[in-house]
Amino acid sequence: MLRFNRVFRDGGGFDSVLVLLALAYLVAFSAFPLIYNLVISFQSVDLFTIATFDRPFVGLENYRDIVNDPLFWPVVRNTILFVGLSVVFQLGIGLALALFFRLDFPGSTWLRGLFLAGWIMPGLVVGAIWGWLLAGDFGVVNWLIQSLGLTQQKIFWLSDPSISIYSVIIANIWLGVPFNMILLSVGLAAIPADVYEAAELDGATRLQRFFTITLPMMRAQLGAVISLGIIFTLQQFDLFAALTQGGPSNASNVLQYWSWELAFREYRIGHGSVVSVFMIIVVIFVATAYVRSTRHEHVV
Amino acid sequence: MLSSTPWKRWLLLAIAVLLVAIYLFPLYWMYVTALKTNTETFANPPTLWPHHAELKVARVWNDMGMGSFIQNSLVIACGTVAIVVLFGTGCAYGLARVRSVWMDVALFLVLMLQVLPPSLLITPIFVAFSQLGLLSWPRTGTILATAANKLPLYIVLVRAAFTQVPRELEEAALVDGNSRIGAFLSISVPLARNGILVSAILIFLQALGEYVYSRSLITDRAYQPATVGLQFFVGPNASDWTGIMTFAAIYVTPILIIFVLLQRRIVSGLTSGALK
């Protein structure tokens, strides 16, 4: 007891105890569910066995059911579409805005910060607002594109099965642009100005400077931002809940929403866990890339 | 940084204002719709400015039962922040102070747990909570799960704040006879208080917008937060858009005000923490 007291009171034990307390909490409520999810994915779980501890193990049956589910491949395709388009446009628009707000004009930092108002909003509220903007009959987006003469008919963004996924993508791009822009701005600010001046003296054009200086020097930053973009897009759930609820008839369903629906709407808890396992493997893979890219940055 | 002539700078400013205006149009549309009458909301062509503005705060507040929703949101957000600050501050301090292989492993674990999507963890959490009987206290369960989700971000942000505190000040306190915990509480925490405060507020704002856990763990309407309440009214068949937008406006205006006031600090905290 005395020795413990000395180590904790005056020595390095103090730091360890503080770190371990938080880690214990995280293990209990984040890491344990992760493992438990894997266990459930091999079990047959329904409403009657949910609260008991001995549930029958069914081997790979849940996995077979999910892969053979007629919804599986359409939902995978939607997820890839959702992540791919969201990340490409978030990054593209974010980079363009970051480059623009680096220019020298009054109030640039303050105006740039206003974009983050979109990022701090609860996802569900953003979904509700976009649901109203994109509403079929009275939505302002339909009015705008009709008065610009882009289409004759109204577009039913949320109830047309071939379009509904894109309305969620649009809302998600809106939500993700600020974060991309701010992180990329930090990277741009870290590039020393004299590199540009030297290139300018050598007669490099703006475009050449962008491709030979900006992009190569931003490589680590871009890697981190892309990985974070993928991770946040895979976490996106609220927009689906507010906009389409995966519908109509699952046309805009993605893995993370499908997993929840299986478990909480249809009470096929084992099946929901299987979808989670697939997703978590992808997330961990991307997260490793992210953590490595931030490590890399320390060295540079 | 790139120098330009005066008139060009004003032109750039004009473009920048235009970009911000385009980006923030959805927010503007929420407020404008909230102020319109029901007939004006569905007018074609839509009016860009409410002609007969009316404030429906009291009606929506009562009709949609916002009092209990907002109260539950606050309870969940406060509980989450309390747990996160209690567990996270010390951990962030330890991770900032000690450099060793084990601390690197711990930091790696924290970073990995930061990225787990709540929508995928909720199924096992729901099963485990129902086995433990925690579902009888649904808000407590939601707080415990949300705190685990937000804790890593807080640790990363506050760790960056602690690395700014000079080690020498603390060592001086130790020489003067303070215990480690005494030096931690009387020297390090006060010196890092800005970082801690801003990070805690950021977690609070994020927890106010939490949806997945509340939606799945809380079945009783009386305990549900504002996000779940709002979801009840939206969806493919929503029609009372003035009501919904008023609900949304009441709910996010405090969040936006806090954010605009602290914008600069939150941005610098995020950028120093998230990428280093």
Image: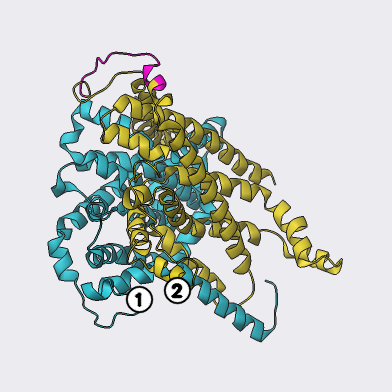
Q: Is residue A208 left or right of residue B63?
A: right
Q: Position of residue B79 (x, y in %)?
A: 26, 47
What residue range appears in magenta?
Answer: A51-64
Residue A250 sits above or below residue A281 on the image: below
Q: Residue at x 52, y 30 (%)?
A: B102
Q: Is residue B59 left or right of residue A286?
A: left
Disc 1 residue type (three-letter)? Pro
Q: Dot 1, how many residues are within 10 Å of its Cα: few (below 14), some (14-19), or many (20+)?
A: few
Pointer 1 and pointer 2: residues touching (CB < 8 Å)?
A: yes
Residue A59 sits above or below residue A251 on the image: above
Q: Is residue A61 magenta?
A: yes
> Are discs 1 and 2 located on one and the same chain?
no
Q: Nearer the viewer, residue B158 or A51?
A: A51
Disc 2 residue type (three-letter)? Ser
Residue matched to label 1: B45
Residue matched to label 2: A147
Residue A116 sits above or below residue B76 on the image: below
For residue A200, which numbered disc appears in the image?
none
Which shade of the palette goes to chain A?
yellow
Q: Is residue B39 left or right of residue B88?
A: left
Q: Is residue A161 magenta?
A: no
Q: Which chain is cyan?
A: B
Secondary structure of the residue carrying tag 1 is: loop
Residue A151 sits above or below residue A12 on the image: below
Q: Position of residue A101 (x, y in %)?
A: 59, 69
Output the chain of dot 2: A
